[in-house]
Amino acid sequence: KTVLLNEVHHRVKNNLQVISSLLNLQSTHASDPRLRNILAESQSRVRAMALTHQLLYERKDFSRIDLGEYLDRLTQLLLGSYREDSARIALRCVLPGEPQFLDLERAVPCGLIVNELVTNAFKHAFPAVRRGAVQIELKAVGEELDLAVSDDGVGLPEGFDLASVTSLGLQLVPLLADQLRGRFTVASGEGARFELRFPLALPTRRPR
């Protein structure tokens, strides 16, 4: 069974990497900047998902992922995606001292949420040549996990409402938070802060 699971995750990872490469190839042939941007965002989401299978394959523990390790590796991927901006925008990941384990079903939404929020910050929080920092922070609070993405950029537009945004990436965030049965809060002032609080363990389902 272990050998079979190992092979499954290895193949899923490889297949997702092929999809990522195809999206990258397509973007290099796209003349429309908007289309290139859409393809790049899709590639970033696929890479975030592929990383979960990469970690399961590497650790040979197919039941859970250390969320801190995943976020740290995801940070490196995102830095690679924004090489041109990394000279003026720092990306930091602050993690708890103890590992926080999640199953694959919940690690993927966490990774996608971070991917979308970091992408949004790099694109909109630091216009022109403004310098600043984006921070990913994970901490345990009792029986819950607190996952936050914050920046010291220009802040959110007045009257910002996550429920009425037109950006696909930000539309995904509350949907993914619902999968985690989490509570999402947004704050803006000197920068922006998106914070998700969700249970470390989901209630067990009663058999029918």
Image (cartoon, grey):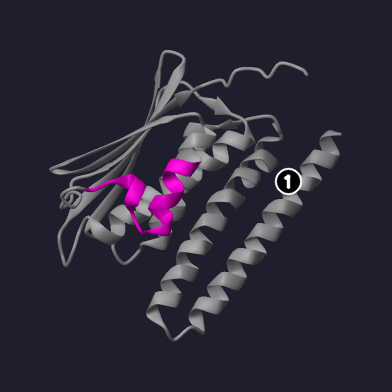
Q: Position of residue 84 (x, y in %)?
A: 31, 67
Q: Residue at x 38, y 55 (%)?
A: 79
Residue 53 coordinates in the image, percent (x, y):
65, 45
Magenta segment's dominant SS is helix
Q: Is residue 73 visible?
A: no
Q: If the image is split into quadrants, where does the C terminus sit?
A: top right
At 71% across and 35% down in the image, what residue appears?
Answer: 60
Q: Which image quadrant: the N terminus? A: top right
Q: What's drawn in magenta, residue-wise?
A: 160-175
Q: Nearer the viewer, residue 181 or 153?
A: 181
Residue highlighted by disc 1: 9
Amino acid type at mark 1: His
Please state if 104 lies on the left or on the right of 66 as rendered: right
Would you place residue 56 above or below residue 130 in this image?
above
x 27%, y 51%: residue: 90
Which residue is located at x 42 percent, y 83 percent? 32
- Percent of width and height locating residue 96: 40, 25
The foreground one among 134 and 105 is: 105
